[in-house]
């Protein structure tokens, strides 16, 4: 039987060939296609690294340098034409699973149109990331070369070359040279290892801690449940970017963001003194804290111990710099390096608690910046036994208390120096005022004496006139 259609049905095109009008809604809205953008390359000064590791960022930097070296070559040099027998050999070699020939010099790497469009959408042409491709930043110096610098995001402790960057800038982690120690390390170890006045934990408390530790899979869970049982009633701040510090290395490094930190309130130092040293002792722009000298880094079940070490060393270097600046101010000298530590830190990775101390060292010459060292104090596997748990808990608390007492001593000395300088300024101002007012007082005293003499003369004249009047009256 033949199917009949009405006039309206015959006018409609097939669904496949019909175009949707702008006013017609989609019955099944299509999801937006995600544009995959690769992670930006961290800015690393490769020429200053003592050792270059085989990482993805290092390979990208090698490709970038090779592409820059080829820009000045002619087309014939860029694409050398091999002989027929060489071409056959290369094809046979590649067919057998040889290396990627695109990594050879002479091969011009070309970015695909899709990658170029994604890169242009991501980084504007005038952005600082693109401008950094034409400059090599070495500390505070800038060299005009476009082969030794890479561009992208800032380098952090999660980068494979972060430890090498610290070493290149004279900041040594505890495992760089274990023989390097501060002069007061024995004193610090004695203070950290001493028993607490409070009673040690019992078996029940240790089991509760082990339960909270085993159930915590991320850092936030450890910070909420396990760490408070270790630290007790001590108060600390958590997870905030210290964006007011002057860069310790360069702007290409991220600002420190410790998991835990402790410092003094803004009223611990006079406000003019804190403002004078703001870039070294005030971590936040709102000036809510000054001179933090205790830091803690916590890693969860899948966290990296190496990253925790990098972060702890980097954080503590900022704290050591702040206390050093205060000690220099209190002593009234330009540089005072006594090879003693005044900054403490802690790492909690897995179930191991490690405590560290950090201190500054003088620069090697007049053109370099001061360096910083970190030394290991104690190590405790707190999940191994109840004795280790009590020892690790006591070490963490004692390190916190030691850093606080050390910070208070430095604050007291700096405040005393500030008040002494204020008294000297007041005394000098009074002396200047007296010197300026001296001639004026002499002139005022001389003028007063002249006025007194004039008054005496006028009184004598008055007395003589009265006497003459009396003699005249008697003669009459």
Image (cartoon, rainbow, N blue to C red):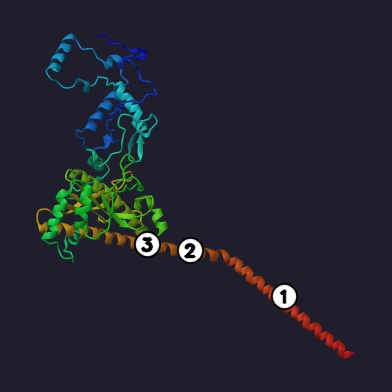
Residue furthest toward the front?
1
Numbered circles on residues, count: 3
Report the residue at 32% width, 24% height from top: 116
Q: CA distance from mark 3 to mark 2?
A: 20 Å
Q: Is residue 275 visible?
A: yes
Q: Nearer the viewer, mark 1 or mark 2?
A: 2
Q: Which residue is mark 3?
A: 415
Earlier in the chain: of badge 3 and badge 2, it is: 3
Query: Which type of secondary structure does the marked residue at label 3 adopt?
Result: helix
Q: Answer with the quarter of the image where residue 75 lies.
A: top left
Position in image of residue 49 (x %, y %): 24, 37
Q: Few, some or many C-alpha atoms within 10 Å of disc 3 (few <14, some 14-19, many ≥20)?
A: some
Earlier in the chain: of badge 1 and badge 2, it is: 2
Q: Few, some or many C-alpha atoms within 10 Å of disc 1 (few <14, some 14-19, many ≥20)?
A: few
Q: Which residue is mark 1?
A: 454
Q: Which residue is mark 2?
A: 428
Q: Is residue 185 visible?
A: no
Report the residue at 23% width, 12% height from top: 81
Vertical arrangement, residue 75 with respect to residue 459, above or below: above
Residue furthest toward the right?
476
Q: Few, some or many C-alpha atoms within 10 Å of disc 2 (few <14, some 14-19, many ≥20)?
A: few
**Quadrant of the frame with the N terminus:** top left
Answer with left or right where residue 311 lies relative to residue 22. left
**Quadrant of the frame with the C terminus:** bottom right
Position in image of residue 340 (x %, y %): 25, 56
Marks 1 and 2 close (CB-CB < 8 Å): no
């Amino acid at each position: 039987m033949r199917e009949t259609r009405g006039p309206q049905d015959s006018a409609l095109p097939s669904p496949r060939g019909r175009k949707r009008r702008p006013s017609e809604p989609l019955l099944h809205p299509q999801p937006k296609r995600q544009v995959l953008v690769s992670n930006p390359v961290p800015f690393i000064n490769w020429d200053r690294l003592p050792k270059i590791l085989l990482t993805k960022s290092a390979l990208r930097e090698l490709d970038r340098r090779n592409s820059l070296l080829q820009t000045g070559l002619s087309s014939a040099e860029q694409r050398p034409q091999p002989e027929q027998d060489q071409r056959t050999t290369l094809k046979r070699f590649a067919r057998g699973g040889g290396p990627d020939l695109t990594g050879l010099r002479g091969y011009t790497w070309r970015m695909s149109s899709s990658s170029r469009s994604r890169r242009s959408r991501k980084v504007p042409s005038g952005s600082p990331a693109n401008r950094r491709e034409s400059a090599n930043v070495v500390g505070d110096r800038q060299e005009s070369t476009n082969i030794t610098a890479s561009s992208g995001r800032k380098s952090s402790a999660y980068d494979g070359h972060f430890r090498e960057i610290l070493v290149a800038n004279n900041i040594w982690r505890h495992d760089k040279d274990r023989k390097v120690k501060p002069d007061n390390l024995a004193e610090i170890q004695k203070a950290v290892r001493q028993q607490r006045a409070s009673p040690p934990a019992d078996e029940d408390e240790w089991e509760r801690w082990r339960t909270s530790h085993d159930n915590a899979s991320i850092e936030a869970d450890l910070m909420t449940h396990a760490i408070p049982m270790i630290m007790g009633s001590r108060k600390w701040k958590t997870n905030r970017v210290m964006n007011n510090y002057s860069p310790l290395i360069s702007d290409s490094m991220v600002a420190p963001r410790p998991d835990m930190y402790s410092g003094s309130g803004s009223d611990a130092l006079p406000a003019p003194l804190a403002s004078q040293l703001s870039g070294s002792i005030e971590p936040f722009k709102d000036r809510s804290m000054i001179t933090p000298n205790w830091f803690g880094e916590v890693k969860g079940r899948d966290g990296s111990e190496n990253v925790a070490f990098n972060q702890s060393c980097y954080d503590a270097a900022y704290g050591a710099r702040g206390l050093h600046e205060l000690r220099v101010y209190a002593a009234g000298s330009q540089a005072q390096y006594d090879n003693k530590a005044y900054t403490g830190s802690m790492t909690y990775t897995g179930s191991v608690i490690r405590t560290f101390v950090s201190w500054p060292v003088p620069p090697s010459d007049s053109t370099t910046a001061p360096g910083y060292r970190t030394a290991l104090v104690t190590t405790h596997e707190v999940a191994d036994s109840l004795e280790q748990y009590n020892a690790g808990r006591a070490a963490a608390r004692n390190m916190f208390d030691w850093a606080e007492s050390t910070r208070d001593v430095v604050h007291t000395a700096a405040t005393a120096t500030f008040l002494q300088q204020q008294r000297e300024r007041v005394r000098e101002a009074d002396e200047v005022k007296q010197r300026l007012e001296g001639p004026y007082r002499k002139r005022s005293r001389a003028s007063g004496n002249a006025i007194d003499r004039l008054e005496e003369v006028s009184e004598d004249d008055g007395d003589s006139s009265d006497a003459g009047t009396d003699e005249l009256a008697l003669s009459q």
